[in-house]
Amino acid sequence: MKKIKKIIELSLLGGLSAVAAGALVACSQDEFSGGQNEAQQGGAFVIIEEVAPNQYKIKEQFPSAETRVVLQALDGTERVLSKEEMDTLIKAEEAKIDNGTSNLTNENAQMHSGGLSLGETILASAAGAILGSYIGSKLFNNQNFANQQRGAFSNQSAYQRSMNSFNQAKSGAKTNSGRSGFFGGGSKSSQSSSFGS
């Protein structure tokens, strides 16, 4: 854990988020193969990039011991979002889901060609699934969410890498048979909307 925290700190100072992500996935895979308990396997390291003013995409995400979201802004700066910031954004997005104005669930909503809002992007990521698991029932089996989740990545290869890393992590760990899928839903969760199924 100390090594992972040090890697993140160094990456932020040097602007090497991709290197940190690669190191984290290697560390995480070591932990999974070493049979660590499930409490150490429940996190995600997510890099979100701003692709246009107030429009975001998921650049990379990997399983990790702790949930961290690094935001890369248009001006080239990087910072780790606090849990309080993410909770606020997720709660605001939940309100939009409830009133039908979220791009994640409203089939009539038009997603910006550049990307989603920051709150939508976080909720579409593995970090959102962990921190916002309490609203999973509002997203489970929602086809528009499944489509937007795939589109929330910067490109298809980033999406596939994420799928592969979470599937490998899950296959190497002892899983709780009562939970499966991105939000811990049932076995009907489709692969396109689940990083752990």
Image (tube, rainbow, N blue to C red):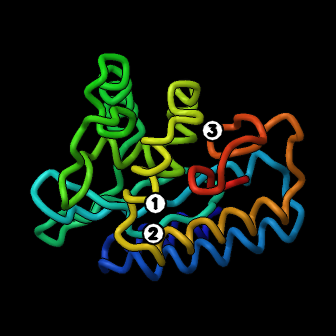
Foreground disc of the pair 2, 3: 3
Q: What is the distance, in whole Å, between disc 2 and disc 3 at their CAs?
A: 19 Å
Residue assigned mark 2: 60
Disc 2 and disc 1 in contact, CB within 8 angstroms: yes
Foreground disc of the pair 1, 3: 3
Query: Which structural element holds mark 3?
Result: loop
Q: Residues within 10 Å of mark 3 (few under 14, many from 20)?
A: many
Residue at 85% across, 59% down: 173
Residue at 21% across, 44% down: 110
Q: Residues within 10 Å of mark 1 (few under 14, many from 20)?
A: many
Given the image, on which type of amino acid does mark 3 rest? Phe
Residue at 52% across, 60% down: 45
Given the image, on which type of amino acid does mark 2 rest? Glu
Q: What is the distance, in whole Å, between disc 1 and disc 3 at their CAs?
A: 16 Å
Query: Which structural element holds mark 1?
Result: strand
Residue assigned mark 3: 183
Q: Foreground residue, 14 or 86?
A: 86
Image quadrant in which you'd find residue 189: top right
Residue assigned mark 1: 46
